[in-house]
């Protein structure tokens, strides 16, 4: 499940009809991260900046809403909000991150809320109070995860223990939340850190919950 696909940064690639993916280098840690665009709703999820991205999004219809799966995924949101006048939606429990006057004024959303048509927020927590998932009613259904699960060449995994305050307790909490999300209808898995799983995403998550591992982010 490598997220290093041979394509130009910023080029939108179809995951399934109605969902596009792109990747870029994170400005802080330098790793490759993934973002997604819902074409019908004109929604950008956890958008990372990349060369030519604004022009690509214009050709795709423009952005009406930006949704963050947690407060840390601001990434290239400011540029998109400025370019399109898009509304920025953030988990309500993560709004304190947005106190600076030079940042976009976000709209807080609650767990269980349908933020935009066909996109409902679900709490994951454990790793952070505002770490969540978005259930997307597009095609076979999709689930977008914040940082609870990441992808590497071996498949799905936890972030390294060094990024958790109490690794064992955090993992127990994550597995409980992820098990609950398996009750949702989805086949596509969208990761903020890792390439999207276009089919068999629910199966992959079920396997991970049954046999958890830690991913290599090096």
Image (cartoon, rainbow, N blue to C red):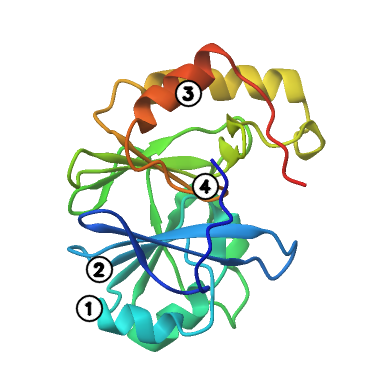
> Camera-side residue: 160 or 13?
13
Q: Which sits earlier in the primary sequence, circle 4 or circle 3?
A: 4
Name the mark nearer the viewer: 4 or 1.
Answer: 1
State which quadrant residue 89 falls in.
Answer: bottom left
Q: Are marks 4 and 1 in contact (CB under 8 Å)?
A: no
Position of 211 relative to 41 (above/below): above
Instruction: Provide the secondary structure element on which disc 3 rests.
Output: helix
State which quadrant residue 169 falls in.
Answer: top right
Question: At x 34% / y 78%, what residue is drawn?
Answer: 57
Crowd rating for badge 4 (residues with CA inside 10 Å; few <14, some 14–19, many 20+): some
Instruction: Provide the secondary structure element on which disc 2 rests.
Output: loop
Q: Which sits earlier in the primary sequence, circle 4 or circle 1?
A: 1
Q: Which sits earlier in the primary sequence, circle 3 or circle 1?
A: 1
Q: Which residue is mark 1?
A: 61
Position of 149 relative to 167 (above/below): below
Q: Which residue is mark 3?
A: 177
The spot of residue 196 in percent (x, y) is 43, 47
Name the mark nearer the viewer: 4 or 2.
Answer: 2
Q: Which mark is residue 42?
A: 2
Q: Which sits earlier in the primary sequence, circle 1 or circle 2?
A: 2
- Estimate the spatial distance between the alpha carbons at disc 4 and disc 1, rounded to whole Å: 31 Å
Question: At x 55% / y 47%, what residue is drawn?
Answer: 194
The spot of residue 163 in percent (x, y) is 76, 39
Question: At x 77% / y 47%, what residue is drawn?
Answer: 218
Q: Which sits earlier in the primary sequence, circle 2 or circle 3?
A: 2
Q: Is residue 83 left or right of residue 23?
A: left
Q: Which residue is mark 4?
A: 93
């Amino acid at each position: 499940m490598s997220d290093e696909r041979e394509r130009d940064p910023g080029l939108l690639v179809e995951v399934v009809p109605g969902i596009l993916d792109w990747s870029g280098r994170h400005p802080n840690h330098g790793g490759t991260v993934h973002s997604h665009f819902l074409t019908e709703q004109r929604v950008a999820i956890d958008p990372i900046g990349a060369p030519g991205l604004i022009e690509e999004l214009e050709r795709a219809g423009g952005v009406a809403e930006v949704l963050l799966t947690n407060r840390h995924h601001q990434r290239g949101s400011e540029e998109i909000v400025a370019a399109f006048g898009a509304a920025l939606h953030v988990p309500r429990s993560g709004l304190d991150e947005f106190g600076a006057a030079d940042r976009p004024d976000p709209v807080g959303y609650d767990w269980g809320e349908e933020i935009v048509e066909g996109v409902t927020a679900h709490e994951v927590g454990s790793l952070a109070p505002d770490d969540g998932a978005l259930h997307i009613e597009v095609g076979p259904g999709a689930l977008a995860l914040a940082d609870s699960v990441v992808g590497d060449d071996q498949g799905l995994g936890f972030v390294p223990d060094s990024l958790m305050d109490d690794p064992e307790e955090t993992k127990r909490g994550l597995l409980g939340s992820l098990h609950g999300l398996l009750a949702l209808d989805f086949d596509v898995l969208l990761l903020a850190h890792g390439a999207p799983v276009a089919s068999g995403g629910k199966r992959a998550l079920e396997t991970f919950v049954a046999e958890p591992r830690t991913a290599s982010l090096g």
